[in-house]
Image (tube, rainbow, N blue to C red):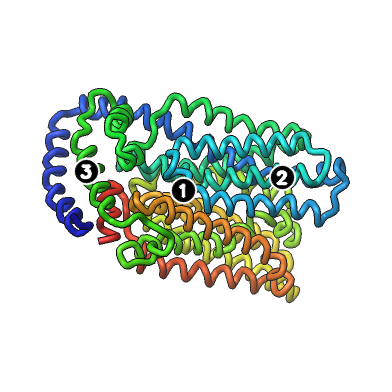
Amino acid sequence: MSIKDDLEREEVREPLMDKKNLSDEQGGSFVQSRSKESAWMVYLSTFVAVCGSFAFGSCAGYSSPTENAIRDDLSLSLAEYSVFGSILTFGAMIGAITSGPIADLIGRKGALRVAASFCVAGWLAIYFAQGVLALDLGRLATGYGMGIFSYVVPVFIAEISPKNLRGALTTTNQLMICGGVSVAFIIGTVLTWRALALTGIVPCAILVFGLFLIPESPRWLAKRGREEEFQTALQKLRGKEADISQEATEIKEYIETLEQLPKARFVELFQRRYLRSVIIGVGLMVFQQFGGINGVCFYVSNIFESAGFSPSLGTIIYAILQVVVTALNTTVIDKAGRKPLLLVSASGLVLGCIITGISFYLKVNELAIKSVPALTLTGILLYIGSFSAGMGAVPWVIMSEIFPINIKGVAGSLATLVNWFGAWAISYTYNYLMSWSSYGTFILYAAINALAIVFVVTVVPETKGRTLEQIQAAINA
């Protein structure tokens, strides 16, 4: 049986699915009500999973409000604190490399437990640290947990969600990351750095407890041949009264097709049958990061300060806007679709970069100096608003949808690794680029985001309203 055969079966099924939809409509409000009631386990499972996303955000947001206090208490040099801040990204890259194999070996829930354990150990090491070694080891451990969370959370949510809810639920991953960063930033202004470290344990504890209440990914169970557990998990997620026979058959048939293919290794990702999905997943991660987000995010206070705008006020507005736009995004992604959101987002990123670049050009050349703060604020807020509207969350949604389950571990690890490498590269090179040319830096970012528009138009498919099996069969046919 081939992917092509599977795609042909999908085409045969479409009329049957349409007929089923017609009969559902005839069922009236009773069917709609039952559907809403049966989704509670999907919502609970998503809530538990995105506690990992909040833990991710807590890790990412920790170093900003604590820099002065940690350096004073432990007598760290600027170089030593820079290592403490940046080692998080190296831990995340290691986590990204191992996240796929771990999730494939012990399951999505098992991988979430591993990530939470590393984060808890890391936070405790930071809390009890009396010197730079314990501090760095703790930061490395939390980074490793972040790397696993960044892959497993969106994949788990995509695999448990019905197609009409998948986009919105997967987008909550990015919303909770933003929430974790913002909460760390705000409460970090009133708590000591050791107390702030303990707050990072809270979402991990909720996650570990919550995992006892929710089922494992049915698709992972089916891939492992655990038939009875697969049926039980899918029934829990769809509701006691739901007819899961068609969905269960579709999942099993697709996995049987994939199981006939050789076991995926890294080099096999670049075979023709998988190449398009790899290009889409990795390409979106490249454009997400190399469009400059971590340079802007890590140094937003410096950007506002250098432009003559209040850094504290600018950062607060920035954080609030990021959370609000990401929250709104969860309500429209399954209606508007993935591709339109990416195009609108990338277009806004180009415009935001150009406006910010113009403001720095005016400042360097001492032209219309009074307009520089307003232009900078407008450009940066447009940039982060546009990023939150699409390029922040949608690449993770699409990454969780496009890889067939037999290569999902290896391919997902590659995409996540590329994402973290990009995060490190942009944050590391930002200051060097700004010293070369402040306005040139943002024009460069604008050019990269313009290329992202071309990439989305020509390469990225729309995945809204389709099952994972339909998406993957179409892409990899």
Of the pair 192 and 85, the residue shown nearer to us: 85
Name which residue lies at 42% across and 61% down.
Answer: 343
Dot 3 or dot 1: first in sequence order is 1
Q: What SS does tag 1 mark?
A: helix
C-alpha span from label 3 to label 1:
25 Å
Is 171 placed above or below 443 here?
above
**Image quadrant for the N terminus?**
bottom left
Q: CA distance from mark 2 to mark 3?
A: 45 Å
Structural crowding at the residue carrying mark 3, measured as other residues with C-alpha within 10 Å and reported as few (<14), some (14–19) or many (≥20): some
Quadrant containing the C terminus is: bottom left
Rendered residue at 25%/58% (across/down): 474
Tag 1 residue = 101
Residues at circles 1 and 2 in contact by the CB criterion of under 8 Å: no
Residue under the image location 34 percent in, 66 percent down: 271
SS under mark 3: helix
- The location of residue 433, given as percent across then percent down, is 68, 70
**Can residue 466 be seen?**
no
Query: Which residue carries the number 3 mark?
Result: 250
x, y percent for residue 429: 67, 66
Q: Which mark is residue 393?
A: none
Give, as a three-letter code, the residue at label 3. Glu
- Depth order, front residue of 172/262: 262
In the rendered structure, which disc, 2 or 3, sits on the residue that comes first in sequence? Answer: 2
